[in-house]
Image (spheres, coloured by chain):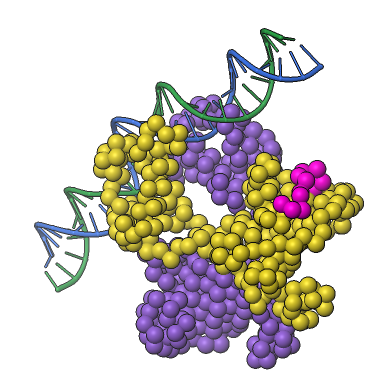
Chain colours: A yellow, B purple, C blue, D green
Amino acid sequence: MDRSSPVPLYFQLSQQLEAAIEKGRLAPGSLLGNEIELAGRLGLSRPTVRQAIQSLVDKGLLVRRRGVGTQVVHSQVKRPLELSSLYDDLEAAGQRPATRVLRNTTEPATAEVAAALGVAEGAEVLVIERLRLAHGEPMAHLCNHLPAGLLDLDTALLESTGLYRLMRQAGITLHSARQAVGARAASAEEGERLGEPEGAPLLTMQRTTFDDTGRAVEFGSHVYRASRYAFEFQLLVRP
Amino acid sequence: MDRSSPVPLYFQLSQQLEAAIEKGRLAPGSLLGNEIELAGRLGLSRPTVRQAIQSLVDKGLLVRRRGVGTQVVHSQVKRPLELSSLYDDLEAAGQRPATRVLRNTTEPATAEVAAALGVAEGAEVLVIERLRLAHGEPMAHLCNHLPAGLLDLDTALLESTGLYRLMRQAGITLHSARQAVGARAASAEEGERLGEPEGAPLLTMQRTTFDDTGRAVEFGSHVYRASRYAFEFQLLVRP
DNA sequence: GAAGTTCGATTGTCCGGACAATAGCCCGGA
DNA sequence: TCCGGGCTATTGTCCGGACAATCGAACTTC
């Protein structure tokens, strides 16, 4: 515990606990020791210790039971569902992703895009069309729409990183997203782009992303090759 | 605020606030008023008020800004991603779901099922195969595996409600799940079951569900007609 | 008029304490 | 033996206060 650090004490503690769980120093199923004693031992107050523990409970790493104690979850826990870009996902999986920008222009919004972004139909919006590759093989076709004036996107930057990272760097605080995941058969044109035969099953995702003021900042229509990609994630039950 | 009620004060407050937001009495984008004054007005302490507000921040309904205040999010918020059964989803959408139980037996676990559930290969597991219909039309084919002895499932009950509801009623506390969502082409047999031609795109989901001790309590392989169903959900960005 | 500075407002962090609710255990009684 | 009651441990809830960090706006200065 470093009291001179600017990082909050409860956060320091939660990180230490998380690391201990990760490394197996705190065995799954083991009790954590009661809060009062733990606080005394660390020289912290009980509310601070509780805040640290609570953050790990929210992450699904710990379970509290009144009258019993706090236990380490016997975890299959990997990664919760996040608003992450496909780029980051692939990079984390060691797939060395690449991007080919097919289009980076502004166009009048279609009715569908206008409705999703909450702008007038025909208003200018940024349109970005990309092909995402892994190991040189096409993985997905991504088409994104952004309100004009929010951000200007350099094609070279788009080829070397994900869209969400660029948006965050531009000071946009992403807050929530509404998603729909489905499947459909590939048209001839889609098949050619992705290297799949016509009629092959494709995984589709449409996503509208909002910032913390509730403004829609992005609308994306993505198509993945079902033979090469699936969404994997973890979700927690809200108690 | 009812101090004699067994329901916690912070929870009472968060529910009142949520209702006020829902009903529009608290306009999107409006400030909530500072915590100190709010606490004084309600006769509560600041920590209690903070706890109520925090729970709504976690739900994505409010945003806090240091030095500014707490704002109601301009929300497109509907429903976060939950561990819900397809049955509940369809019922909420007014689709009048029906279930046809195709199989309800115990069998030795295959290698895949044994690995997912963490039991020995060949150990007895419950196998449930169901066809889910909406408006008399097939929507999905659900195949679930459960460790033997966890629960005995009445076929009649399974036809009238969802599996998760039955598990919760049996005292199992669902905690987290690991999911994979993909797509594939229908085999001839699958197509026939669901009323789709062979080769039609299908949406697939595999899910392993864990209880709060980390034990796997269910493994499901689900197949949805892509022409009639897509997953829709909301997700929040973890700050 | 523009840029930098100060200041008030508001949330963030942390403390110490008090009592309530619940789960599990031990023990006694039937 | 079996069942229930009481005891203890532990988390859940709530209070009141203190100071720090940050944001925005008003103010000052050039």
Residue at (31%, 60%) from the top-left corner? A27
Q: Main secondary structure of the magenta part?
A: loop
Q: What is the quadrant of residue B169 in the picture?
A: bottom left
A165 in relation to B169, above or below? above
Residue at (72%, 89%) from the top-left corner? B198
Image coordinates of residue B189 in percent, x first then y, are 65, 91
Query: Camera-side residue: A199 or B49?
Result: A199
A152 in relation to B142, above or below? above
Image coordinates of residue B118 in percent, x first then y, are 39, 76
Q: Is residue A34 visible?
A: yes
Task: Determine if the magenta segment contains residue A154.
Answer: yes
Query: Camera-side residue: B41 or A31?
Result: A31
Residue at (50%, 36%) from the top-left corner? B50
Task: Determine if the magenta segment contains residue A189.
Answer: no
Q: On the picture, is D2 further left or further right than A56?
A: left
A180 in relation to D25, above or below? below
Image coordinates of residue B154 in percent, x first then y, are 47, 81
Image coordinates of residue A149 in percent, x first then y, are 80, 43
Q: What is the quadrant of residue B98 in the picture?
A: bottom right
The magenta segment: A147-157
Number of marks? 0
Residue at (38%, 60%) from the top-left corner? A73
Query: Camera-side residue: A52 or B89?
Result: A52
Q: On the picture, is C6 further left or further right than A50?
A: right
Q: On the picture, is B5 further left or further right than B200?
A: left
Query: Camera-side residue: B41 or B130?
Result: B130
